[in-house]
Amino acid sequence: MFVERHGLWSQEQRAQAAELKKRIASEKLELVRLAWADPHGASRAKALSVPAFLEALAGGYNINVATTTLDSAGGRVFQSFTRGGGMNLDEMTGSPNLVAVPDPLTFRVLPWAPNVGWVLCDEYFRDGTPFHFSPRHLLRKQLARTKYDLKIGLEIEWYLARVVEERLGDEHVGIPGVRGRPVRTAPMEPGYSYHSETNMDLMQPVFGELAATYAKLGLPLRSIENEWGPGQVECTFGPQGALRAADDVLLFRTATRQVCRRLGCFATFMARPALKGYYASGWHLHQSLVEGTKNVFTPETGEAPLSGLGMRFLGGLLHHAGASTVFATPTVNGYRRYKPNSLAPDRAGWGFDHRGAMVRVLGGAGDAATRLENRIGEPAANPYLYIASQMVAGLDGIERGLQPGPRDDEPYAAERPLLPASLEAALDALDKDALFRAQLGEIFVNYYLQLKRSELRRFKAWLDESRADIEEPTAWEHNEYFDFF
């Protein structure tokens, strides 16, 4: 069968697959969703009958390559039905099938969908070659480059609202490349009463359902907090290995959206919706390198906040901040975060326990939780690409001995390179960067640039036609991202 023929599973995965067959029989499942991450970081899925899933465990399951050729509004970016599929790759001609191979270690039973299982898949060509554009494959490749384990802690902000439209109409229906209007929502609480317990309690019925769901899914929730804007929420999760953390983000976002919608509510991971009073949301990525059980970012002695290796990793993050930005902030809308004194960075600097810097360093000698908190990301980022970008940049810092320079106590006034101020500038920075082309591959970087520039062209065309005020989030952004992420 496909899995054994190409040697795709570890011993642990094979053992888990055997246990999984027993579990499925005892749980009386009716369907199993095969899920995979598209290039935007959205979860795509097929629902299989139990017999078909058991066959897929050994032989994989055919899925269409099309989900990787569509931009954020479902518009086809590449000429799939020409030779080379519009990518000059013979294997992409004609929008072919891929083989989706379930990873048994990711299997869950969905708490909100009775008798439905869920499992993440890796995509392969029919000859067993890993799919060029699989974000999960790309992250796994970066993790394999080093003897260290990358540990990731998550802080992700999002918005919870109440749905106020009972049914969909013609105005909600789009066409490929043009999204319809998202459903109307109302705030769950008035906002701007930071950590208010009474305002948080207005959302408690939903929080309770979400907390129970996360626990049943094995997501290591630490806190659910009422943040700044009206209905703005932050969820924090305990540290995990990098691949597990990325998988958890994919599951967390899709689970949150599904559970909230079943409760008559709406969850969005769009950075800044075009609604009154909505403050920008971010995704802060905590990271450290571990060898065995030792955090190698922790300094042995002295007043330095990081070990020498940690300082070099930090130097890599800052040196490649411009080129990596598009993986942390991949939407037109996300760049509305990068403003002075906004709790989001606008330049590539670092500070010790400073929330205005791009990288906030936490810990010090004797602190096993010493880590870097990169505050550059938006909550809609593809978790595999965001985390992979940190490995690419940080490992280059270690290998080349890059130094971050002195810490910035006034980061918005520091003489540091400014971050890209738009999606266009971020794509141009990636285009020119030799390191990311070498590590992620020319094929992937050129593909990603074409995919995201299609999205950008549609936004620019809308601006030219509408002559909208771009100082605030636009209707195009709201339609494009509010119900996609």
Image: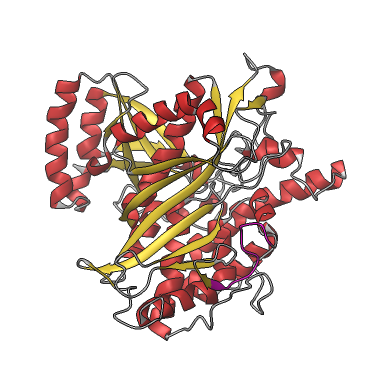
Q: Is residue 205 above or below residue 45?
A: above
Asked which quadrant contains residue 272, the reply is top right
From the viewer's side, name the closer residue of 207 and 404.
207
In the image, residue 347 lies in the stretch drawn in magenta: yes
Q: Residue at x 29, y 72 (%)?
A: 366
By secondary structure, the bulk of the magenta-drawn segment is best described as: loop
Spot occupied by residue 324 in the image (x, y as percentages of width and height) = 54, 65
Q: Is residue 82 left or right of residue 262?
A: right
For the C terminus, give its image quadrant.
Answer: top right
Q: Residue at x 51, y 67 (%)?
A: 359
Q: Is residue 173 above or below residue 350?
A: above
Can see residue 439?
A: no
Residue positioned most to the top: 166
Q: Is residue 147 above or below residue 189?
A: below
Spot occupied by residue 211 in the image (x, y as percentages of width and height) = 38, 32
Q: Residue at x 42, y 51 (%)?
A: 154
Q: Is residue 346 above or below residue 414?
A: above
Q: Which residues are magenta?
A: 341-350
Spot occupied by residue 290 in the image (x, y as percentages of width and height) = 27, 67
What is the total number of numbered labels drawn onto the structure image?
A: 0
Can see residue 215?
A: yes
Spot occupied by residue 198 in the image (x, y as percentages of width and height) = 54, 30
Asked which quadrant contains residue 147, the reply is bottom left
Question: What colour scheme does the image use?
Answer: secondary structure
From the viewer's side, name the closer residue of 429 and 372.
372
In the image, residue 21 lies in the stretch drawn in magenta: no
For the N terminus, give its image quadrant.
Answer: top left
Q: Is residue 99 left or right of residue 44?
A: left
From the viewer's side, name the closer residue of 337 and 38.
337
